[in-house]
Amino acid sequence: MKVQVSSSSFRMALFVTGIVAEMKGKSALYGKRKVPAGEDPWKY
């Protein structure tokens, strides 16, 4: 049984879904934030 593989894939799916949801829900908010080029917007 490859539980590790399926669990990590599941976490990645949740991670991507969460990012998409944040981008849709906070697009206006992120638009006002100043994020340095190449930096992760989720840190700010």
Image (cartoon, helix red, strand yellow):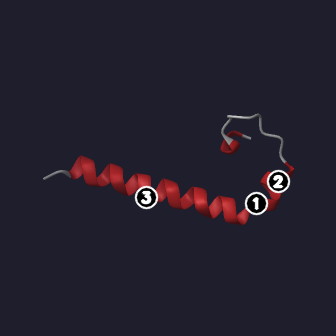
Q: Position of residue 43 (x, y in %)?
A: 68, 39
Q: Amino acid at mark 1?
A: Ser
Whether 39 is drawn above or below 4: the answer is above
Disc 2 + disc 3, Cβ < 8 Å: no
**Residue at the (34%, 53%) spot, across then down:** 9
Question: Mark on residue 27?
Answer: 1
Q: Position of residue 41 (x, y in %)?
A: 70, 43
Disc 2 from disc 3: Cα separation: 25 Å
Specify few, some or many for label 2: CA neighbours under 10 Å numbering under 14, 14-19, or 20 or more: few
**Disc 2 target residue:** 31
Q: Residue furthest front?
A: 37
Disc 1 from disc 3: Cα separation: 21 Å
**Residue at the (31%, 53%) spot, across then down:** 7
Specify few, some or many for label 1: CA neighbours under 10 Å numbering under 14, 14-19, or 20 or more: few
Q: Going by the image, does 38 lie left or right of 36?
A: left
Q: Position of residue 19 (x, y in %)?
A: 59, 56
Q: In front: mark 2 or mark 3?
A: 2
Disc 1 + disc 3, Cβ < 8 Å: no
Q: Residue furthest left?
A: 1
Q: Circle 3 sits in a helix, a strand or a loop, which is it?
A: helix
**Residue at the (18%, 51%) spot, across then down:** 2
**Residue at the (74%, 35%) spot, across then down:** 37
Label located before the other in sequence (1 or 3): 3
Q: Quadrant of residue 38?
A: top right
Q: Going by the image, does 19 lie left or right of 23?
A: left
Q: Amino acid at mark 3?
A: Ala
Q: Quadrant of the C terminus?
A: top right
Question: Mark on residue 13?
Answer: 3
Q: Amino acid at mark 2?
A: Gly
Question: Mark on residue 17?
Answer: none
